[in-house]
Image (cartoon, rainbow, N blue to C red):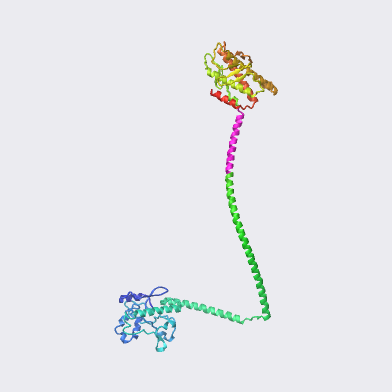
Amino acid sequence: MKPPAAAAAGNRAGGVDPSIPRFKCQECHRALVVVGVDSFADKLPSQATSGHVSSVHGSIMGASRMDNSYVVLSKQNRSHGHGIPPRLPSVAAPHIEPNQPTRAMEGSYIVLPPAAASIYKTSTSEGGSAQLPPPSINSSSLLPGNSFHSNVTVLKRAFEIATSQTQVEQPMCLDCMRLLSDKMDKEIEDVNADIKAYEACLQHLEQESYNVLSDAGFQKEKLKIEEEEKKLNAAIEEAEKQYSEISSEMKDLEIKSKEFEELEERYWHEFNSFQFQLTSHQEERDAILAKIEVSQVHLELLKRTNVLNDAFYISHDGVIGKINNFRLGRLPNVQVEWDEINAAWGQAALLLHTMAQYFAPKFEYRIKIHPMGSYPRVTDIHKNTYELFGPVNLFWSTRFDKAMTWFLTCLQDFAEFGISLDKENNVPPEKSLKLPYKIDGDKVGSHTIFLSFNKLENWTKALKYTLCNLKWVLYWFIGNTSFAPPSGSLCAVQSSSKR
């Protein structure tokens, strides 16, 4: 066999039939061709060679076209008889140049084992070697169309049988065959070394002496082994029993573990829910505490604040006194409307009535003040009621004068009650209640409170002194009480403020 270079030259020399099969090396997968077929042409009969040698020279598996394929054994290997010939160093296929004539087949072989070679008809020649002649050398078999395909089939079958016998894929090129041969030689050397090692071990074992037990000793060892086997079997049974018990316990533990996992998962769900609720409650508590702190600050502020002091702010504008910015009195050059004067009297009556009601029944509230907004009234000790509002006639205002007089009397009675209360509480005289302007009947200080036949300046001063005494009583009231006004009084204050 040789690579396809020579086949390419043959293809150029004569026309190549594309249907003709080509063989490849099963190791390197290079295309292979059969060379040296021309040397076999000399062995053909004369009737076969005449007119057909040119066809052999044109074989596509050599340098000429291959009309018939043969399995040829070289003369150099006939002395070896049947079997596998040794590898020859000169079996390499020569490269054929396109213009170089084809050389004789000297070392090209298709090597078959004895079982594979038996499919051919062998004949004994010189030296007893077996030569595989062509199936039938005649004019009809050399024709390309008659027996070519059957010969190719035989060649392929030979490769299959060689593959099955040698466990090596065939065909192979010479280079791959040489590599395979080297590899097998190395394996043979390794096997031979192993054989020698085994033989040495066997000889060593054969030279050793063995202590052969007697029958009694054998029976004793046997009983001993049986007892150990029983013990081991019992131990195995015990281990299996323990294993079954442990498996049962493991199953119970797995069930309990699953239950614990479910309990743990539920616990963490409840714990997270509780933490969320706790956080919400803490935030709500903090908000409430913040509100409580603010409320306490307001409460302390309110404790230091007296509602009466804020509800009844008494001041003056020159000669004219004021309560909650309502002027009480009038001058010739300052004409104050009666509606404003009436509102001022209503605020003063509400203040005096509130303080008197706070100490009732301890305070003998003989003269009743009726705060009715801008239309207050006064009831004397004889149950007579007088209007404490205007407008009135400057020359004839008896009822209005009596109402103002009874108001002064009630204010004086409440001041005297305060002085007596300080005495009861052992308040020093310098800190006890004392009116800045003395009240005597219808006079405050040195001015009468009557409007009839009186000057506006004197009447206005008397009203201013009355408000000053009322403010003094209010300060005493604030210092000696923790006043919380009744709802009725607050409503009255709000209604009077609106008016």
| Nearer to the camera, 297 or 62 | 297
Relative image position of residue 93 (x, y in whole percent): 38, 78
Question: What is the total number of numbered labels drawn onto the structure image?
Answer: 0
Residue 160: in sight, yes or no?
A: yes
Tell me the quadrant of the picture where the N terminus can be found.
bottom left
Relative image position of residue 352 (x, y in whole percent): 61, 21
In the rendered image, residue 17 lying in the magenta stretch gets the answer: no
Q: Is residue 95 left or right of residue 220?
A: left
| Quarter of the view holding residue 90 | bottom left
Relative image position of residue 420 (x, y in whole percent): 68, 21
| Nearer to the camera, 388 or 355 | 388
Residue 126 sits above or below residue 222 on the image: below
| Nearer to the camera, 287 or 2 | 287
Residue 443 sits above or below residue 481 on the image: above
> Which residue corresponds to the image point at 61% horizontal and 82% vertical from the top-left?
207
In the rendered image, residue 282 lying in the magenta stretch gets the answer: yes
Relative image position of residue 132 (x, y in whole percent): 39, 84
| Quarter of the view holding residue 42 | bottom left
Magenta stretch in the rendered image: 279-305
